[in-house]
Amino acid sequence: MVVAQRLRSSYVVINSERCKGCRLCIHACPKGILALAPHINEKGYLPATILAGKADECTGCAVCAMMCPDAAITVYRHEEAPSHSIS
């Protein structure tokens, strides 16, 4: 099962079946928006998830993805193209 949430201009995707619940991402997140899910995955672990009430606080910094030893987290950033005025 893959958990994905829309966050401002970023998408955080957590592959809950790949996650071993090591909590490294939870401790690394500067905004504290990650926690362990209440369900157990196929491997018997409690995977990381995004807290529903805090999803909007994510800045897309990707520290969680960098800390994940199992590559279970991907952060997608969508930046707006700069507007150019023609003179």
Image (cartoon, rainbow, N blue to C red):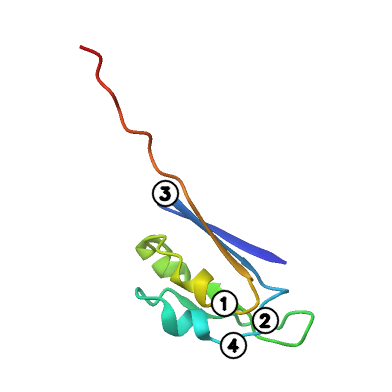
Look at mark 4 in the image and give the residue it sits on.
22
Q: CA distance from mark 1 to mark 2?
A: 19 Å
Find the residue positioned furthest to the left. Answer: 87
Question: Which dot, 1 or 4, sits closer to the camera?
Answer: 1
Question: Which dot, 1 or 2, sits closer to the camera?
Answer: 1
Look at mark 2 in the image and give the residue it sits on.
39
Q: Are marks 3 and 2 in contact (CB under 8 Å)?
A: no
The amino acid type of the residue labelled 1 equals: Cys
The vertical placement of 84 against 71, above or below, is above
Question: Which dot, 3 or 2, sits closer to the camera?
Answer: 3
Q: Quadrant of the C terminus?
A: top left
Q: CA distance from mark 1 to mark 4?
A: 8 Å
Q: Are marks 4 and 2 in contact (CB under 8 Å)?
A: no
Say which quarter of the image contains residue 73.
Answer: bottom right
The vertical placement of 41 against 60, above or below, is below
Q: Answer with left or right where residue 87 lies relative to residue 19.
A: left
Counting residues from the start of the chain, the first of labels 4 and 3 encountered is: 3
